[in-house]
Amino acid sequence: MNFHEFEHDDWEKLPKRYHDAFSTLTTQAIGPLLDSVLAKKGTRLLDVATGPGYVAAAAAARGADTVGLDFAAAMVAEARRNYSKITFKEGDAEDLPFPDASFDAVTMNFGLLHLARPDRALAEACRVLRRGGRFAFTVWAKPEEARGLGIVLGAIQKHGDMKVPLPSGPPFFRFSDPEECRRALLQAGFESPAVRTVPQTWRFKSPEELWDFMLGGTVRTGALLRAQTPAALEAIRAEVIALSSSEVPMPAVLASGIKK
Ligand SMILES: C[S@@+](CC[C@H](N)C(=O)[O-])C[C@H]1O[C@@H](n2cnc3c(N)ncnc32)[C@H](O)[C@@H]1O
């Protein structure tokens, strides 16, 4: 199975667990994301990798003429259930099913790090924008800052094996580097790239939630955990629960550019 199929298979199973784990977290970046693309009444906006549709719904609430797109049929069904008045379409971020220059704004909230060919998706976002249109995306900050990820990856490094066989994908934290965001945006055809950090906090009702959310609500990290030996997994779990607290910082890197 290649990386694209691996991601796709899991996202088809994840809508409910993703919502339970991440809806209160990834929605914290939506205001700054929509501000970066100047979303307002009448903006033709495409939200790529829309998942359950949170960004699309917030854009529509601003009066934008919004379409949400995701490659998982189960996510599209979930988004339609959540927001029945918004148009959601099944499709691939790396091969957008829209003509050139059909949008004023394109957003992607925590989608880029799941793609097999992220540079292709940046070029596609640029293609479907009109000249002067704006694109913005978010990814997680590095694990030293995004502590929910840092705690889990640190525990695997300490007690487990980071090199268990999994379909190989692009580096998870590639776009956590602002310089790399700028470089990739320029290469895809954008100008005036801008990158900043958006503070976010992940809040938990119990010490076990960080563990449960990462094990059951994520694709790559969940698979990495499930591939550990039972003994290693138990040691990792104990460490994650010991280091977790009722809230952990999970800042986002927000990058944007303007189509030349
Ligand atoms: C981490 S979720 C983000 C969901 C949502 N944007 C949010 O703010 O919470 C990533 C989403 O990207 C979708 N996705 C992954 N690869 C994709 C691709 N190649 N094309 C379209 N969607 C993709 C997944 O199905 C999933 O819904």
Image: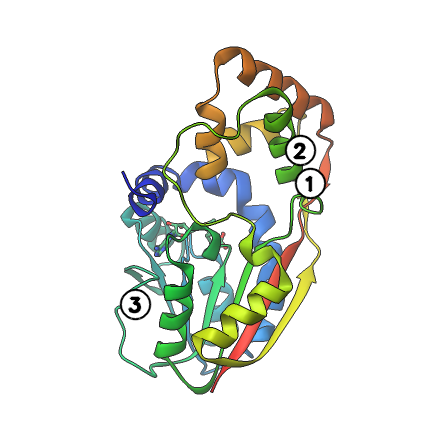
Mark before the other along the chain sequence, 3 or 1:
3
**Residue at 46% in and 41% down:** 18
- Camera sees residue 51: yes
**Mark 2 or 3 closer to N-term?**
3
Q: Is residue 151 above or below residue 138?
A: above
- Classify mark 2: helix, strand or loop: helix
Horizontal and vertical percent position of residue 131: 43, 88
Residue at the far front: name it.
Answer: 163
Q: In this figure, which residue is indicated by the disc labeled 3? A: 96
Residue at 40%, 29% in the rendered image: 165
Instruction: Confirm or deny contact between disc 1 and disc 2 (CB under 8 A).
Output: yes
Which amino acid type is marked by label 3? Leu
**Would you say 59 lies left or right of 32 here?**
left
Disc 2 CB within 8 Å of nearest ligand 1 atom: no
Q: Residue at x 59, y 74 (%)?
A: 36
Residue 66 visible to the viewer? no
**In the foreground, 157 or 214:** 157
Distance between the alpha carbons at the discs numbered 3 and 1: 33 Å
Look at mark 1 in the image and give the residue it sits on. 147
- SS state under label 1: helix
Q: Relative to residue 253, is residue 21 depicted above or below?
A: above
Q: Amino acid at mark 2?
A: Ile
Q: Looking at the rendered structure, which numbered label has been put on residue 151?
A: 2
In space, the residues marked 2 and 3 are separated at their CA atoms by 35 Å
Q: CA distance from mark 1 to mark 2?
A: 6 Å
- Crowding around mark 2 (Cα neighbors within 10 Å: few <14, some 14 to 19, many 20+) is many
* Horizontal relation, residue 81 to residue 57: left or right: left
Q: Nearer the viewer, residue 156 or 105?
A: 156
